[in-house]
Amino acid sequence: MMKNKEKELFRVVHKVPSGDGPYVRAKHAQLVEKDPERAIVWFWKAINGGDRVDSALKDMAVVMKQVDRTEEAIEAINSFRCLCSSLAQESLDNVLLDHYKKCGKVDEQIALLKQKLRQIYQGQVFNGKPTKTARSHGKKIQVSIRQETARVLGNLGWAYTQKGNFMAAEVVYKKAQMIDADSNKACNLAHCLIKQARYDEASNILENVWRGNYAGSEDAKTRNRVEELLFELDSRQPPPFLQNLPGLKLDDDFMNGPEQLINEWAPSRSRRLPIFEEISTFKYQLTC
């Protein structure tokens, strides 16, 4: 009797599931023995043996990333997710996105994030529920569809930024801010505007963050980010004695934003950015 209680206490303390199958052995190797390579072997056995495949595939991918086998983890998810239930697909997507970031696969990130936006629009996320339970800093929180949409858009904006496509990133960040504004996305939007030499717009956004007009504005990391962006902003603007010289005005037609730039260079093309065309179908559903 005492041994059973000790085993149960051990299992709870180490967060190891009960049982004696391949998945349990994998978790024991991962959490108790601290042997990731051994854990990966047992996770493979669990997947091949049909033992808690949803959890085994996700957990194995996480462990693989920890031992710099991220590319292999990506291949495993893409190859074996068909064995997992529909309930596991969203969490597998999140793991996949994290692994794409680790490997610098920006195009793959963009494609998967666009897919997630389509799923949100079609009501396929959260298993049809309006909210889901998630963890943040070790605490359980409720995440709404609106918050999830803004998060995905924010990640998409960041991916476009990594590619240097600041016009597309700007459009996405603005859409995300319309849905669920916060200081992090505001700073990222200001960064995109600075890269496009639209300094007055960037300055106004940073001032609003500094004044605490966005959620998270008081965070120390946010304050430091604002200071860094203001320093970059100041370093990029011409000296005051040059600002009024002909040809150097920052508010002329050439600097008035991405739509006017597109019209100047390609008047026969659509005035709307490609990414805006793709997410504009969500306009009324996501902003109400």
Image (cartoon, rainbow, N blue to C red):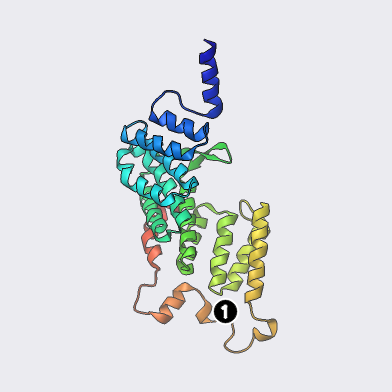
Q: Residues within 10 Å of mark 1 (few under 14, many from 20)?
A: few
> Residue furthest toward the left?
82
Indicate whether 177 appears above or below 127. Answer: below
Q: Residue at x 36, y 38 (%)?
A: 44
Dot 1: element: loop
User: Does residue 153 show up?
Assistant: no
| Residue 215 left/right relative to 172 | right
Quick one: 42 or 170, which is closer to the camera? 42
Name the quadrant containing residue 264.
bottom left
Task: Please state which amino acid type lies under the numbered disc 1.
Answer: Asp
Residue 47's spot in the image, x, y percent? Answer: 34, 36
Residue 3 location in percent, x, y? 52, 14
Quickly name the residue at label 1: 251
Residue 137 left/right relative to 84: right
Q: Nearer the viewer, residue 176 or 227?
A: 227
* Residue 197 spot, x, y in % from top left: 56, 75
**In the image, residue 113 above or below residue 15:** below
The residue depicted at 44 percent of the width and 49 percent of the height is 69
Q: Residue at x 52, y 19 (%)?
A: 7
